[in-house]
């Protein structure tokens, strides 16, 4: 069984740091890796949502509290 989690992140926005990620994105990715899973960030655009939800077997979300 492959153990991998993709963290989707919307491109752009005022909540991103100089590296293009939200401040909690890389700690989440690194925590997943620390548990022995593969993880990476994939940039997402809202117009791709229909394709994402029809091709991903499981989806979980996190949203900005702002």
Image: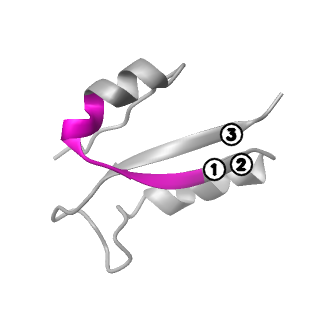
- Residue appearing at x 16%, y 65% in the figure: 14
Disc 1 designates what residue?
A: 39
Q: Earlier in the sequence, mark 3 or mark 1?
A: 3
Distance from the alpha carbon under mark 3 to that under mark 1: 6 Å
> Do the CB atoms of the residues marked 1 and 2 lie less than 8 Å apart?
yes
* Quadrant (top left, top right, bottom left, bottom right) of the N terminus: top right
Query: Which span is picked out in magenta?
Result: 40-49
Percent position of residue 18, x then y: 32, 80
How many numbered badges does the structure rendering display? 3
> Do the CB atoms of the residues marked 2 and 3 lie less than 8 Å apart?
yes
Secondary structure state at the residue bearing disc 1: strand
Q: Residues within 10 Å of mark 3 (few under 14, many from 20)?
A: few
Left or right placement of residue 17 versus residue 25 in this view: left
> Do the CB atoms of the residues marked 3 and 1 lie less than 8 Å apart?
yes
Disc 3 designates what residue?
A: 4
Q: Residues within 10 Å of mark 2 (few under 14, many from 20)?
A: some
- Residue appearing at x 79%, y 34% in the figure: 2
The answer to whether 62 is drawn above or below residue 35 in the figure is: above
Q: Which mark is residue 38?
A: 2
The answer to whether 52 is drawn above or below residue 43 in the figure is: above
């Amino acid at each position: 069984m492959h153990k991998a989690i993709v963290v989707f992140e919307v491109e752009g926005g005022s909540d991103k740091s100089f590296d293009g990620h939200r401040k909690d994105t890389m700690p989440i990715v690194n925590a997943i890796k620390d548990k022995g899973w593969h993880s990476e960030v994939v940039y997402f655009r809202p117009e791709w949502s229909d394709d994402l939800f029809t091709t991903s077997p499981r989806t979980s979300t996190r949203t900005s509290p702002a």
